[in-house]
Image: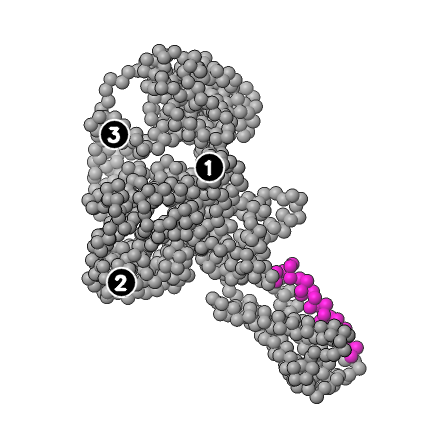
Amino acid sequence: MKKPYPGLMHILIYSGIIVLFIGTTLVMIDSDVWVPLFHRQILVGYFYLTFESFLDAFGLVAIAGLAAAIFRRLFLKPSNLPTSNDDVFIFSILIVILSTGYLLEGIRLAVDKPPWAPWSFVGYHVALFLEARGVVAPSLVRFYDALWWFHAILAFTAVASIPYTKLFHILTSPLNALFLHLRPKGQLSTPFDLKQLLASGNFDVRVGASAITDFSWQQRLSFDSCTQCGRCTNACPATAAGTLLSPMHLILKLRDQMVTQSRLDGGSPVIADVVNPEELWACTTCRACVNECPVLIDHVDAIVDMRRHLVGEGKFDRAKRDFLTNLNNSSNPYGLPQADRMKWADGLDVKTPKEQPEFDILYWVGCSGSYDPRNQRVSRAVVKILQAAHVNFVVLGTEEKCNCETARRLGEEGRYQQSALELIETFKKYGVKEIITQCPHCFNTFKNEYPEFGATAHVTHHSQFIQQLIDTGRIKLTPGAKRALTLHDPCYLARYNNVIDPPRRVLSSLGNVTVEEMKRSRENSFCCGAGGANFWYKVDQKRKISAIRFEEARDTQASVLATACPFCTSMLEDASVAADAKENVQILDIAELVAAQL
Amino acid sequence: MVKIIVLVKQVFQTADLKVDRSTKTLVTQGVPRVISETDKNAIEEAVRIKEKHGGKISAVSLGPPEAKEALREALAMGVDEAYLLTDPLFDGSDAHASANILAAAITKILEYDLILCGAYSEDQYAFQVGPRLAEICNLPQITFTAKLTLSGDRVVAERDLENERQVVEAKLPCLVTVVREINEPRLPTLMAIMGASKKPTHTWNAADLSLEPGEVGFDGSLIEVLRSTVSAGERKRVTLQGEPKDIAPKIIKSLVEEGVLAVS
């Protein structure tokens, strides 16, 4: 019910048809089962009369719903809502069934003329209309039989058409909801357990999806649930940027392949026949599609499964290869020396667990915070805040290595798990109980994915931690100049982990500020374009995702665009330079804003 | 069916190497070891030839026991079997001694049509081992290959000689050294590398190769390092300020003056 119009429309059609279906079934049981068996009627007296009014009313409800649906398709025309033969068929058959139902009732009442006719208020008016037109009983009776059969056959045709039309979602979407994985939003599927494989020495595991049968049955059920409503595609940043990806069309292609595949003997790898790898690489894993989907399809999981196959086959370009090679050789995606990992902290008093074994908090700087000059400034701001609040913290220094969250989303599962096992050992070695990180991607993987591999530390994003420091009075901010701010919600923070209020509360504690919301914010935030490893390679975009987002930020007229993710910061800053607006809109991490007012 | 031997050298990740200024030695502790880039190209080329013509690829690496990791990666890329030549006696071998060790191993493997290796290794940049090995084994050699085509019992190679491109042909068996332009090496996943442990890997020492101590290591080398110096390359750190359109000509002017850009 996130969208009131289509939501109400569905409820009207659904409840109308269901009530009529149950009502008609009751009539059938009454007259064709109960009466012959027990020589008694169930539908008698006031119960019957109320029943008749009730059914007549719900017929109108269904018609209202259908009218709303037709109006929506003909006049409102939501984008990416394709009207197919299916839709024409469904609307027509339902309307004809409903109207012939009323006509049948009207004829019945016109011929029998029972005193209780007005209870069936719609049918009664049909009867009055027929009488007014001078249609007489004998011809009606002959016509009635034919019409009754027509109505019955159409009704059964509608039921029988369910598996062959988009009506199938009536059956599949509740089943999909029932059998959907119960993992947290931020946890990808785990195709194998590296620890187990290392113990057994057997690495013959099929990883990724190249044939439709490589998807789990639940995933295939979810493809069958698609109602082609187009909401995923409307929300998708890759679609907005004019890439090849449209999540709805991707799912529909996979669904069509299920039909094709089922006709093949034994099946064959067919995903490559219909899915262009560029569609898969264009996904930023921002999860806007999953968030929008009314029938709970997990597009991102399916895309990552297909990426896993591509990576396993070595089907990727030089940029992706360099990215993975850098992770393998240097333990960071930049390919910079591991020995330089602490350069960001030059001149700061920051200790490692070796130097200071007693600590409360591990500050996880992340690769961007360690190596990217822009985000090194954020790391320094975080340290300034932690020190101002007298937090007893350490950083891992040269023992910090990329957690390969990005590699996992690119499809290199083995490398991810290898890194996870190694880092979890490091955490254990130093007895890490609490981790804070300024990177929502690191935050998400530590929080939602690491527990599966044995991690126990509590994980907090710096926005949450800074908010706590402010709320508990551990840091005091001197109010800054009067200005308007806007906040870009990082996907992996807001949409994936529901961390929505902490950065806002931090911003409002700056004093003298107004926080202007962007057109799309909070859990409906629009991606900066970096996620799912997109930061590390080029996707053919007609208009950059970051440019679209930066434009939305500019529309708020705010002079500061606050961020809470190093990759969002980099992407949006690039966009501001490209838009020649670096002077007008300052892009700052919330930690930088806070540190400046300590 | 082509039988290919590919030479694989494991080197330190050069970007991570630092020099200890007091001892003038390289700090190698904790520095990741990787396959030398052009050797990766050689492996890739071997795998592509095999994919097209069928055959068998054997990888040979001379190095410390850790070089087994490099061989495992080569196996994951599509090599069929691996030979690790390792022995404390081999330590300190120069290009001459290394070529001798490799020649002994290759003679022991016996059957091959083509030997592929990088034109140089990323640590020494001596460009020696390939040509020396070809001489010892009495094979025709093609160096600096940027394109390789196999047809029948001959190879046609395009040599990248910086200012010119030379097309040459040789009869198999022969040795070909490759440059980075020849291909884009594939990157096996971690799972593929782990799974490659199942492929046969043989370890040979000096005795297995019937090599005498005097033929290998420092004693078997022709080159003796007398001393090392550390050259500190200071950057000029020139900063230009102003509008892009004003700065651009200045940058070009400085680059021309430095000889980085040539004006035609």
Residue shown at 54%/30% (left/top)? B51
Q: Which mark is residue A538?
A: none
Instruction: Judge by depth and name the residue closer to the eye, A370 or B50.
Output: A370
Q: Magenta stretch?
A: A141-168
Residue shown at 22%/24% (left/top)? B229
Which chain's residue wears label 1?
A: A
The residues bearing labels 3 and 1 have C-alpha atoms spaced at a distance of 36 Å
Left or right of B113 on screen, residue A506? left
> Which mark lies nearer to you, 3 or 1?
1
Amino acid type at image mark 1: Leu
Amino acid type at image mark 2: Asp
Q: Which mark is residue A198?
A: 1
Element type where label 2 sits in the image: helix
Element type where label 1 sits in the image: helix
* Residue that label 2 marks: A471
> Which mark lies nearer to you, 2 or 1?
1
The vertical placement of A395 against B177, above or below, is: below
* Residue that label 3 marks: B19
Q: Are marks 2 and 3 on the same chain?
A: no
The residues bearing labels 2 and 3 have C-alpha atoms spaced at a distance of 49 Å
